[in-house]
Structures are given as structure tokens and as C-alpha cells.
Amino acid sequence: MSPVTEKILAASAIMLVLGATHTQAQPTAQLTHIAAANPKVAGFVAPNILSKELEQIVWASGAMKLENPTVLIGFYGYNNDGPLVPVPGAVQVPGSIIEASKTEPDKNTYLILHGQTGPDSNYDYGSHFLFQGHEGGKQGYITRINLEADGAHRVTLMADKDINDKPLPTFDGSTWYPWAQILLFTAEAGKNGGVWQATANYPSVVEDISGILGRGGYEGIQADSDGNLWIVEDVGGKAGTVNKNAKQPNSFIYRFIPKNKHDLRAGGKLQALQVASKRHAGPIVFNPADPDGDILSLDVKDLHSYGVTFDTRWVIIHDTDVDGFVPFDANAAAKVKKATPFKRPENGVFRPGTAFGEFYFTETGDTNKNTEAGADFGGFGGIFKISQKEPSADSGRLAIFYKSDVAHTGFDNIAFWSKNKLVVVEDAGDSLHTQRNALDSGYLFDINTDYAKQVNQPIRILAQGRDPSATIDSPLTDGRPANGFQNDGDNEITGVHISDGDPTVHGILGAKNPRPFRDGWRVFYTQQHGDNVTYEIIPAKQLHASNRHEWNDQDAD
């Protein structure tokens, strides 16, 4: 047994209380608020800071060698096209590669699967696994972190080509679809993006199913209890002519209704969310000839106003029975069918205990402190809630749950910590980090809190730091595109995933109330860019010896 595994097992046996409260006006919380984000200081590395009740352990880092490398792909987070850090005296100029291309492991999916194999036919890989796609580098690939394996067998390359021997695209989102016993991966690549399905066994058999689900800037993907797939698109819009620091809403929320949930290749209907305007008859739509008008439209302001609830309906934008199985541009189809655009929504999750009747999704915004849209017109994004009587309902309601400001913006990954607590993390980007002198943070929201009252603020449970590699890379990104540097800079938080690993239909996210650190529930995330480290969050070590009470998450049940 590896030392890391021993530490996990020891941590899982500890019972403790998270009794500390947030100093701001908040309902009682079990995780202590971190007072400030880490500042961005040129040349300085900063450690991650977690709420004092938590700590983290490393499961994989970018420099960890794959157990079955290829000529191009040798590491968890690097291609084989250069040194892992620049050699002394190296100068980045166009056409040069002074450090290896980083492959950026992204969204995590945790599963308990029995009988899994790997490249080493004589090795027992265990039954606990963390899957992820990679969104950077020369091409995409799928890896599996073997949580019960030794270092030599810790990370397995599951696939780098599809069934047609075509290199995989870079992947962002992932989820498990239990009816068909497949993993789904999304590519946020516009007209080259889409959805790929992959078997969980080694080697993974991967197939492009974008002729059914469409091509788009897809990122978040989740299944509901009816087997429908909800897809969140992240496509940036045009900057305004007048509002040069703001972008036009240009992304959509989709729902796919399969003909056969045991085989998605059978086809189905792709729908997009349409929101009725409060200002005029008809829906809120994309206006291609007027980016500035959309950026500061009263419709967009209403969408980002507390206390305003909108009627929604799903409009069919593609039906394989009518339109066939040729890959199509979902974003363009959504615009033709008058679906409603948002400002870069990235991920979404179902609230547990609602029978999949509530869906929360993040909106990134403009990631620019100087956006002319400001908070009132969605310049900093937010968190939205879709409410429906049932997951397959044709209509529902939409309201903003949290309107972001410059201190809480660039929201990306999202996961329910418990039935009433929601974790949301930032991906603000280097420019905004510099503008506000603050790196990314992870926040805990209470679903029962009224955030329209400014006294109520989310609890910062993670102040993301900056690792050595990201500290080296950050100034190199300042010279792009002129210097040709291919990697990203500051770290971001991604892959936040809270699951008990249940691979049955009863284990899809939203079906059970999460219970972190109890009953097999585990919490993972990746510190993307830089060293690309995937962590598991566990109860804090300093409480182990002094506190033997049970973890007290008041709304876990």
C-alpha cells in the first residue's frame, strides 16, 4: 500500500466537527471563511489556503509519468515536446518551444468499478478510479487515476484516438452515463467541438457522437433521472464597438432527449433553452448585427436582476429523425430557433433532493475588471437556477441566484457539497488576476441565503495559490501572441467533483444528498495550469488527534 493510500484510509476513519462560523452575516456554516484571496505578486509562489477544517493530498501531478506513454504523450500533464521547465537562459521567441506543452487535465469523474484492467496484465488496479479528459497540448486524451495503485501504475492513458484512429480533440467536461455504461467527454471547440463517448474499461473505446448531439463549445454535461443530457456551452461573443471591454452573450444551455438511453447512437432531439422577455413580446434572442445593443440590453439587465423570474421553454433545434446524423453547428441552430444566449456559462449541476427539478449553472462573464457591462449587465457573470416540475418538462422558470461582482467572478466549475450547500470556483484568468490583484478562489454558497442582501456573502473555502511552474509561465503569457508561447499562466481551479462513486443510475449527480467524508463520499479538484496537480480534499489533520466528534454538516441528510 502506498503512503498516499494509507493517508486516505486514515483520513476516512476520522470523525470531527466543523463548528466554526463565518464572520460575515451568514447562516451557521461548518467551514471557516478565508478572509482574502492570495494576491498576485510577480515572481512569487503562493501556497493554496483551505478552510482550517480541510486539507488536501496529491493524487497526480503533471510531471507524473504515465504507465503506458506514447511518443507524444508521456506524462499526466505534459507532452513530450520539450523540457518540463525552461532551461536556464532559454528565451521564448516565435517558433521555439522552451517548455513542454501542458495538457491541462480538466473535469474529474469518480467511479467505483470492479474488474478493471490496465496495461500491466499482472497488476491489480483496484476498484476506485478518477477519470479526466485533457484540454490542452498537441491533442486530447483520456486518463484514469488509479486511486489504489502504486506510483508506477498511478496514471493510465486510456485513449488518445477514436474508433477511426483519429486523434482525440482536447476535452473539457466529463460525466458518467450509467444507462449505457459510458463516459461522456465534451470538447469546447466551437464548430470542431461536441461530445465523445468512451468505455470505462481499458483500453477505452472512444466514439464521436456529434452527429447526434451537435458541435459547439460544449463544457458542462450532466444526466438527469430520465436519461436526458443537459449541456452547458462556453463560447465567447464579440466585443462591442463602443463597449470594447465587454462581450456579447453568445452561449446556450442545451438538453438532449435520447431515443434510447441505453445507446445514445440511436439518436434523439437536441433542444436549447428559450427565455421569455419581460420587456417585449417573444424571447430574448441573439442579435448578430448589434453586439453593443445586446451587451447593454434591458433584457440582459433583467436576467441579472434579483427577484426577477422568467418563463422558459425548450425549443427543438435538431432531431435525428428529421435532420439525420451529420454533425451540425448547435450554436448556429440555437440562434435560428431563437434560443436565449448567456455570457459564457460553463458548468451546471442538479440540486439534490429536488427530483432533478432544479438545475444551477455558472456564467463566467467578461473576465475583465473594466467591462462596461458591470455587474448589472452580467459583466461579471453569476449563478442561475432553472426550475421545472420534472426533468423532461417542456417549460419552467429561470432566475439569477447570485449576481457576481469583480471580487467573485469568472465562475466555472460547480458542485453540490450537500443538499443545500453549493461549491463554485473561479477561473478569472491572468489579466483579471492582475487587475484586481487576486488569484482565484473557491466559494461555498447556501441555497437558502438571500444574496440580494449585500451583507450576505459566500464563504471562501479555497484561496488558490500559484505553483512554481505557473509563476514561471505567467510572465511568458504577457508576451502572447507575439512570442509564440503555447502554455497558460496562473493556476485556475477546475474539476471540482463530489461523489460517492456509485456507477448505477442511482449514483448520478443530484440523485443523492452528498455527504463529504462520510459513507464513501469524496471531494476532488485539480489545480490546473502550472504543475497541474489533482488533489483530494480530506478532513484537516490538526483536528484528528483532538476531536473525535462526528462531522456535523447540518444539511447533509
Image (tube, rainbow, N blue to C red):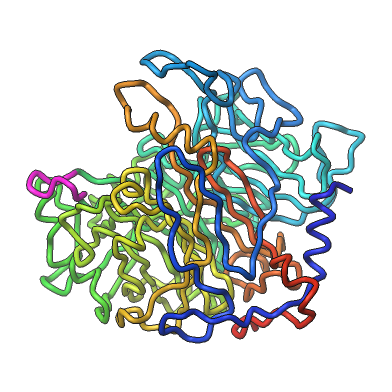
Residue at point 89%, 43% (across, down): 124
Q: Residue at x 36, y 15 (%)?
A: 94
Question: Can residue 264 be seen?
Answer: no
**SS majority, magenta:** loop
**Residue 441 in the image: x percent, y percent?**
46, 59
Horizontal and vertical percent for residue 253?
37, 58
User: Which residue is drawn at the image coordinates 76% and 56% (left, top)?
Assistant: 112
Q: Nearer the viewer, residue 169 or 91?
A: 91
Q: Which residues are the magenta region? A: 239-247
Q: Specify the quadrant of the image occupied by residue 302.
A: bottom left
On the question of residue 525 being in view, the answer is yes
In this rendering, the count of numbered labels is 0
Relative to 443, is 233 above or below?
A: above
Q: What residue is shown at x 53% (from left), y 35% (from top)? A: 469
Relative to 282, 304 lies left or right: right
Q: Nearer the viewer, residue 234 or 50?
A: 50
Q: Is residue 471 above or below residue 519?
A: above
Q: Is-magenta flag for residue 72?
A: no
Q: Position of residue 414 (x, y in %)?
A: 49, 62
Q: Is 271 on the left or on the right of 374, as rendered?
A: right
**Residue 502: x, y in percent?**
72, 63
Nearer the observer, 375 or 54: 54
Instruction: State left or right for residue 222 relative to residue 300.
Output: right
Spot the residue most to the left: 242
